[in-house]
Image: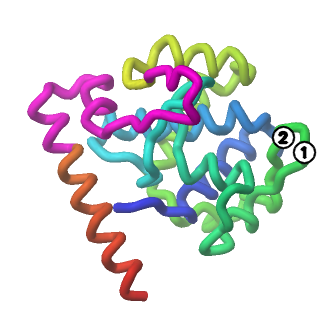
Amino acid sequence: MGFNERKVAQMAAFFLGQSNGKMPHLKLMALLYLSDREAMRAFGWTISGDSLISISRGPVLLQALKLMNGDAKSQSGEWEKWISDDGNDVLSLCQNIDAGDALRELSQADIETLKAVWDKFGTMDKWAICYWTRKNCAEWKNPNGGPYRPIQYDALARAVGFDDASAKEVAAQIQSEQEIDRLFRGLR
């Protein structure tokens, strides 16, 4: 599956809901990445379908970062439906997520993954979580002054415990699904 803006927006909404509706940009970026990382470890795929990159502050999701920074326009309107930028690098939740179907793009396994990530990292401030990801995510490589470096799915899979052959298989499957998704998007 390719990048799913609805899922990413609802992932962000989940974390903002856990944080009384507001969170620093940097912390949310890290939580989204760590959720995809945990999903890879547990299931062999990511929740968001986003491209993975290393920036100087740690690993992040490329399209999610572009949405947060305002460098990409929402394609589905889902990002703006859930998330607003308060300025000063703080993001806010735009609507209540208490309704049972509010986060309907996320499966129960997705929600459980998000809860596990929140339980482990939710109390960290933005700098602590940034430091943690750079120190503990072996797939992150410092871009050394460049804007970013891509993180390959096989590198992520190896970093979370897959053997080399399985990591290559997982990466090939994800890339194949992303290509199919790109083809179908081109037909719309």
| Percent position of residue 61, x then y | 52, 43
Tell me the quadrant of the picture where the N terminus can be found: bottom left
Q: Amino acid at mark 1?
A: Gly
User: Is 91 one of the magenta-colored residues?
Assistant: no
Please state, as top left, top right, bottom left or bottom right, where the C terminus lies in the image.
bottom left
Determine which residue is flagged by label 1: 87
Q: What kind of colouring is applied to the model shown?
A: rainbow
Horizontal and vertical percent for residue 178?
32, 61
Query: Which residue is painted at 68% across and 63% down in the image?
Result: 79
Q: Is residue 18 left or right of residue 61?
A: right
Q: Secondary structure at mark 1?
A: strand
Give the magenta range.
141-170
Asked whether the residues under the numbered discs 1 and 2 touch, taking CB atoms below 8 Å apart as contact, a structural biologist would say yes
Q: Quadrant of residue 8?
A: bottom right
Name which residue lies at 51% across and 47% down: 111
Above or below: residue 153 compared with residue 98: above
Look at 23% across and 44% down and name the residue there. Answer: 171
Pick out the residue farthest to the top.
135
Disc 2: CA contacts within 10 A as few (<14), some (14-19) or many (>=20): some
The percent coordinates of residue 136 (x first, y second) are 46, 14
Q: Is residue 154 inside the magenta stretch?
A: yes
The mark found on residue 120 in the picture is: none
Looking at the image, residue 124 sits to the left or right of residue 118; the answer is right
Residue at left 41%, top 54%?
49
The residue that label 2 is drawn on is 90
Quarter of the rendering containing residue 98: bottom right
Categorize mark 1 by other alpha carbons within 10 Å: few (<14), some (14-19), many (20+). few
